[in-house]
């Protein structure tokens, strides 16, 4: 029974850890799990995401781990490029 440490799978991720990796909120990760879009398992009431499931989701969505949680300026979405700009600040007319 020679189990080496290298043969063990990497530890699963918590929603908080994956949210940090994807720069989103843990509730978004939990919603993906509830919707069946992200493979996961439960330990009691706690949700855990296998690291390979996170990689599968990233590759399925065509996003890197830094983009999987939200759009960045210039991110590709459904063949379009998202362009995020700062809101315009309107000044009241100065007619005295």
Image (cartoon, grey):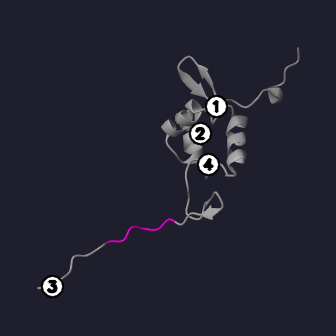
Q: Classify mark 3: helix, strand or loop.
A: loop
Q: Classify mark 2: helix, strand or loop.
A: helix
Which sits earlier in the primary sequence, circle 2 or circle 1?
2
Q: In which quarter of the image is residue 83?
A: bottom right
Which sits earlier in the primary sequence, circle 1 or circle 3?
1
Relative to 93, say whether 86 is above or below. above
Q: Main secondary structure of the magenta part?
A: loop
Which sits earlier in the primary sequence, circle 4 or circle 2?
2
Give the extent of the magenta segment: 84-89
Residue furthest to the right in view is: 1
Quarter of the image containing the N terminus? Answer: top right
How far, Cα to Cα, is label 4 from label 3? 49 Å
Mark 4 lies on residue: 68
Return the x and y of residue 36 as percentages of the image width and height.
62, 32
State yes or no: discs 4 and 1 in contact (Cβ < 8 Å).
no
Residue 49: give its label: 1
Mark 3 lies on residue: 95
Residue 18: give its label: 2
* Residue located at (72% from left, 40% from top): 56
51 with respect to 18 (left or right):
right
Relative to 54, say whether 80 is above or below. below
Q: Classify mark 1: helix, strand or loop.
A: loop
């Amino acid at each position: 029974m020679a189990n080496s440490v290298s043969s063990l799978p990497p530890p699963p991720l918590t929603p908080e850890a994956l949210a940090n990796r994807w720069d989103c909120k843990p509730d978004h990760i939990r919603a993906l799990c509830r919707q069946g879009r992200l493979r996961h398992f439960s330990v009691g009431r706690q949700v855990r995401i296998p690291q390979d499931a996170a990689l599968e989701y990233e590759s399925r969505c065509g996003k890197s781990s830094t983009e999987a949680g939200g759009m960045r300026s210039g991110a590709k979405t459904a063949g379009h490029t998202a362009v995020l700009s700062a809101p315009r600040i309107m000044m009241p007319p100065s007619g005295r």
